[in-house]
């Protein structure tokens, strides 16, 4: 799994997977599932893939 940094906040996140949105309005939309990096009970998030790639950059840990 890859670690990403939010370009605005500098917070680190672990990219867990790429998934598809299956709601009627956005069926087939590509999404990224990610979570807080290096936390005991990390929060999980989902964001549109295009937006994720615009706001996050991969970092080497």
Image (tube, rainbow, N blue to C red):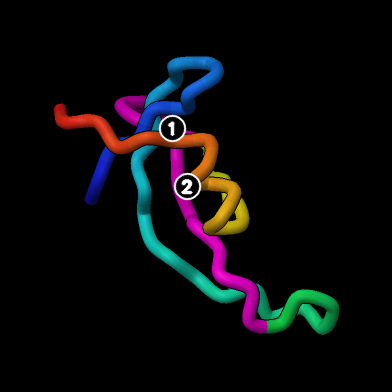
Measured as percent of width and height from the top left, residue 30 is found at 56, 70
Residue wearing tag 1: 36
Query: Which of the two labelled residues, at mark 2 and mark 1, occupies the earlier sequence position?
Result: 1
**Residue 51 disc label:** none
| The furthest residue to the right | 25
Q: Is residue 18 left or right of residue 2?
A: right
Measured as percent of width and height from the top left, residue 4 is found at 35, 35
Q: In which quarter of the image is residue 25?
A: bottom right
Measured as percent of width and height from the top left, residue 16 is found at 36, 54
Q: Is residue 38 magenta?
A: yes
| The furthest residue to the left | 61
Looking at the image, residue 27 lies above or below residue 19: below
Q: Does the magenta stretch include residue 10?
A: no
Report the number of discs: 2
Q: Do the residues labelled 2 and 1 touch (CB within 8 Å)?
A: no
| The furthest residue to the front | 54
Looking at the image, residue 30 lies above or below residue 51: below
Q: Name the residue rendered at 64%, 73% in the picture.
A: 29
Labels 2, 1: front one = 2
Looking at the image, residue 51 lies above or below residue 43: below
Gap between marks 2 and 1, in whole Å? 16 Å
**Residue 53 disc label:** 2
Local SS, label 2? helix
Q: How crowded is mark 1: few (under 14 residues within 10 Å), some or many (20 or more)?
A: some
Q: Residues within 10 Å of mark 2 (few under 14, many from 20)?
A: some
Q: Is residue 1 left or right of residue 51?
A: left
Q: Is residue 55 left or right of residue 59?
A: right
The span shown in magenta is: 28-42
Q: Name the residue rendered at 76%, 75% in the picture.
A: 26
Q: Quadrant of residue 50?
A: bottom right
Measured as percent of width and height from the top left, residue 3 is found at 28, 37
């Amino acid at each position: 799994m890859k670690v990403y940094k939010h370009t605005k906040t500098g917070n680190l996140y672990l990219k867990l997977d790429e998934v598809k949105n299956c709601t009627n309005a956005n069926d087939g939309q590509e999404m990224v599932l990610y979570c807080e990096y290096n936390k005991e009970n990390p929060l999980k998030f989902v964001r549109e893939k295009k937006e994720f790639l615009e706001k996050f950059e991969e970092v080497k840990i």
